[in-house]
Amino acid sequence: IRCFVAVLLVRNDISGHEKQIRHLSLSALPGGVKFPDSAGGFHYAESGKLLSITSNRFIHWSTSGDTVQLLEQSLDTNLLNNAVKLKFTHCTVLPGGVSIQETLNNVIVLIATNQSVHRIVLLHPTRMYRSELVTEFQMQSIFADMGKLSLQDPTHSAIIPMTTVGQTAGPSAATAWLSHRGEAHYALALPAGGIMVVTFPPHNTQGSVTAVELKRSSMMQRLAGWMPSAIRGEQSPGDLALSLAVRELEDDSFIFAICQDHKLRMWSFRDQTCLLEADMLEYMPACKGVKRVAGQGHRLRLAFSSTTGLCLAVYMAVPQRGQFTVLQLVATDSNRYSLDHISSLFSTQETLVDFALTSTDIWGLWVDDSNSTIIKYINFEHNTAGQWNQVFVQPPPEEEVHIGVDQDPRIYRRGSERIVDLPWETLKKEVTVAVENELQSSVTEFEFSQEEYRQLQVEFWSKFYACCLQYQEAQAMPLGLTISPHTAMVCLFKRGFVSFLLPCFAVDHLYLSYDEYLFSEEETPIAEDPEVGRDILQLVQCLRLVSDAVSGEMAYEMEKALEHLQSPERAAELVLENIDNMIEDIQNKLQDIRNPTAAMIVLLREMDLETDSETGGDGPISLNVRISLSQLYGSSTAVTVVCQAVCHMAMTRALFCRDLLILQKLYLRLGDNLLQLQQDLIPRSSHLLSSYYLLKHIISVTFLKRLIKFLLLFLSVLSPQTVVELFYQTVARKAIISQIYSQQQSPSPGNALLHWPHMASNVVNLLAQLLWPSNPGFQFPECLMANCQYTQLQEYVRLIGPWCQVNVGSCRFMLGQCYLANGEGQKALQCFQEAATEVEKEEFLMRLTGAEEEEAASTPRLQYYNKVLRLLEDVGLPELVIQLATLAITEAINDVRSQAALWTRIFKHHLDLGHNSQAYEALTQIPDSSRQLDCLRQLVVVLCERSQLQDLVQFSYVNLHDEVVSIIESRARAVDLLAHNYYELLYAFHINRHNYRKAGTVMFEYGMRLGREVRTRLGLQKQVNCYLAALNCLRLIRPEYAWIVQPTSGAMYERPGASPKRNYDGEFAADPVKRQVDILELKDLEKEYILARSRLTLAQHHQPSAAIAGSASAVEMVALLVQTGLFDCALSLCQTFKLPLMSVFEGLAFKCIKLQYSGEEVQNEAWNWLAANQLSTVVNTKESRLAFQITALRTSQRCHYYLVCRFIFVCIKGFCDYRDFKTYFRRL
């Protein structure tokens, strides 16, 4: 026996196109006949083929009064614009009045109401796309263009004629079909008895609508004028058809009707005659008195297969009992038919809602007195005992929710249905606001204690919960079911939802089944030994007693213990202490079990999902098959079905393990097999209980969209609502489908049929294995991390921490990444360190370290540290990088390359943090000289940029002195002189080490470059200072060592890293010329200093001269100074460089002569250059006093002004004695 589980899926009232169809000539019929709501489905003929565009594609329909809602769904692809609602004004849709047929080019919807019939012609999916292969995540439904159709076109819509004068009631039942010629036929059960068949011509041909009334004698009418073809016969009320069905065989259509008189009649539409009549009461035992009561709830279904032919199933709704009778239509000679009885099956006393017939089974749908849904099925050929198989429907939510003292009354739990209108978080917010507003509006007092306010919260939230239960109860009313003949998929339609039926696993079947179904060891396929099977049955019955004894409060405490990571074993003991009143009954039941430990071992083995291998498979599959497999079970519908099936399994088995653990604790009290229970069975049960609780928890965890933009666009197509749905869509589905098809024996998997029960059970089981925490695969946490679900991942790791010993290091690593994302760096570092010990043991960490782009380290652990260090660097935590790198160095004792890389990291981050001393210490530890030199260069540059020159100069640089000098020199020669101060840094560096000659050399070179490159007043001022500093350095040295080597131009100033073979133009450079080394002593530096000072003086008095003075020689400077009027400076320069004075005197004479013939304004300006020659500094000599006396006497004599100036100038400077001056003066 194989049972099924009904998985609640999506809401059935999805909004879509809404079209109103109205005939002006129609009005509502009197009497107000109302038919019950109904539902059904249509499955494409190629829905079971993998390589078809209609694979796993179907249409659901539901009726309610005057409305028909159509919904197309696919398990492989999301369909857009897939819902439509049709409203027929003044009409009511008949039972059985909706039928969907497909042709090669079209999908045709046939609808019959109590006053009209309609045909809707849509394009077939195979004609909507050029290719049979679908590569998109979503595609348009056949209902996408429904709004463009004219549904009131006379060729597709007609009014049913009234066959009886004064008739006020319309047909009560209908069926519709499409003939092989394309004609649309509607069989309508007339209220006075008989059947009318309305026919539309093929939709692409011209023709009129016809109607045929089938009676014991028939007549035919055309809507454009009635044309009687026979005399009307009389009909009795017993001829009223309660249920209709039709089947085309060869070139005829056979219409079957079960009537009020309990008779089954078969009509030939071609011959318009009744070919067969059978009294169904003949197949019912003890049917006395039934004939006198008119039938009301009889149903009829057909099924055809190539092996059994046409089978009929008739449900006889007899008071106090119901019976299904299965018959086979047999053709005899001379166009005669008979019925062979196959089976009679009795049903329960519940009210039948719908049933379906397949070639082997009958599926029934009932509701009991409490409006609970019941589904069962039975094989009508090979079930002599008449035992119906169970379908476990999801029970309604508990009427009261236990709210713990430590809990918020606002408890939210996502239902199994998919919410498409509002995001989950938005819905929670709106509900909270509504309930809180209701609470506030009912309060009359302004002050409450905390406990009083909590009681009010509990009261109002309980009211809201009760309203939700009422809504769900109304929406859960069953309407019908459908079975796909191509995939064997069973769907249950409710007023508000659609449920998919999936096979129930054997161990779940044992726990969910009622006692009456567990009557023999044949019910335990999980055990081959009959004795063990019997013990398992007895043990399951004991578990059911335990389950009944556990109250809601105790169950809550047990679940709370699991949530808070408390010991499940201790929680089970506490529960056991509270069920003392049931212990005696359980003990009596336990006495019937001969070997309880063997039965427990079998159950635990069946519930353990641990596997040794990774899920996934590889094999040679064609491109078409791979494309189809990439879409298989990928739609939102399939995702929800699969994930809810896993949830149902987890919930069932969590209860199973809970009750088993409590029972094992009871066994300990009895003293049986204590050692095996304590060491093996109880720990395994506790582990399984925690694992299934974890599965149940993560399936309900909401997916939070906190991704980068392009991932959000991708996931908006997938629209996952929980993290498990996200995992299935992005990771698990591909691996699962690959494994399923790699294990198939078929040489061409593309031709394999998509058998839903087999595929669904495999997909659900494999998904549960991927989620199982004790399996080596680590894809689920990886998926959470890849999609930024940090909170959910933290909770996952927290729940498995105390008891899961698989992937411990991987979980610590993931937890560390969560802490990083939340800004908790120290916690993250602790987790990363804990994970390091498991690097060589766990597949995920090995794969993580094997994906390094850099050169591989010597050990996996060092590779792991490199990975973590990059993570820490990416989030900007240099302190943690330093800590972890310091730890990693201890692992790299024999790996010089890794040590160098780690010390380099430590140096870099210390330097970034401003820890200059620590950075220098790390630099000295780098064993690789090239890395060390790079770091040293970086240290110099960074400290210079930060102006932290004191630290740079004071470091000892053991064994690195020459390298530091070389680096600073190269930087000094490569950068702008005014923007950086590397020369001054190098000067300070040498001064700090008392290397004065080097310091002088540096400053002299600095001054030389300033004269060549910075020809401004500021540059000349710096040059003077440089030469003066160089002089000071040499004066601090003993005279015999007071010399320097003159820096040469050219190669010294080449940029670092320049090619030694080519020049700046790319040409081959000439061979270097050997140059003579020039030694500069102190007197040479003094000359350069005086020359530089004269240049500065010139620039100070005449700004434009600074550009040419920087590179001028001493002779050129004398001319420039004389030209500017700086005779004092010119004479000093001549004296220093031993140059002739004639040019100075001639310049002075020229100025005097020029002044004699100039105006008063020019003569007044002459005092400016005279004052520039610093007379005040030498007025204490005999000659200077005489000069000033003469100046005072002859000031008024302008004509001799030049003589006075000449005299003063020459005397003051003392370039000639007084007698020479007198001689020279007389000559003038």
Image (tube, rainbow, N blue to C red):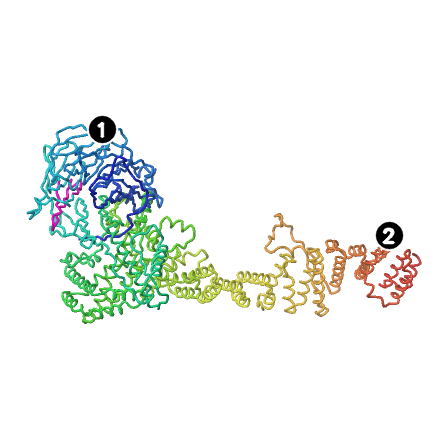
Residue 394 location, quadrant: bottom left
Q: Secondary structure at mark 1?
A: loop
Toward the right, the furthest residue is 1226
> What x and y, as percent, mark residue 1081?
73, 64
Circle 2 Cα neighbour tier, 10 Å, few/some/many (<14 / 14–19 / ≥20): few
State yes or no: residue 323 in magenta.
Answer: yes
Q: Nearer the viewer, residue 1025 or 463?
A: 463
In percent of width and height, residue 463 lies at: 29, 59
Return the residue at label 1: 224
Q: From the image, which quarter does the C terminus lie in?
A: bottom right
Q: Is residue 638 left or right of residue 1117?
A: left
Q: Nearer the viewer, residue 155 or 1019?
A: 155
Residue 90, position as x, y percentages in the image: 25, 40
Q: Is residue 12 left or right of residue 838?
A: left
Q: Amino acid at mark 2?
A: Ser
Q: Which residue is mark 2?
A: 1158
Quarter of the rendering containing residue 1082:
bottom right
Instruction: List x then y, in percent, for residue 16.
Output: 32, 44
Is residue 1103 shown to the viewer in this render? yes
Residue type, numbered disc 1: Ala
Q: Quadrant of residue 595?
A: bottom left
- Neighbour tally class for label 1: few under 14, some 14-19, many 20 plus, Cα within 10 Å: few
Q: Is residue 1121 left or right of residue 54?
A: right
Q: CA distance from mark 2 to mark 1?
A: 134 Å
At numbered mark 2, what does the secondary structure look like: helix, strand or loop? loop
Classified by dominant secondary structure, the portion drawn in magenta counts as strand
Residue 313 part of the magenta-drawn span: yes
What range of the chain is rendered magenta? Answer: 300-328
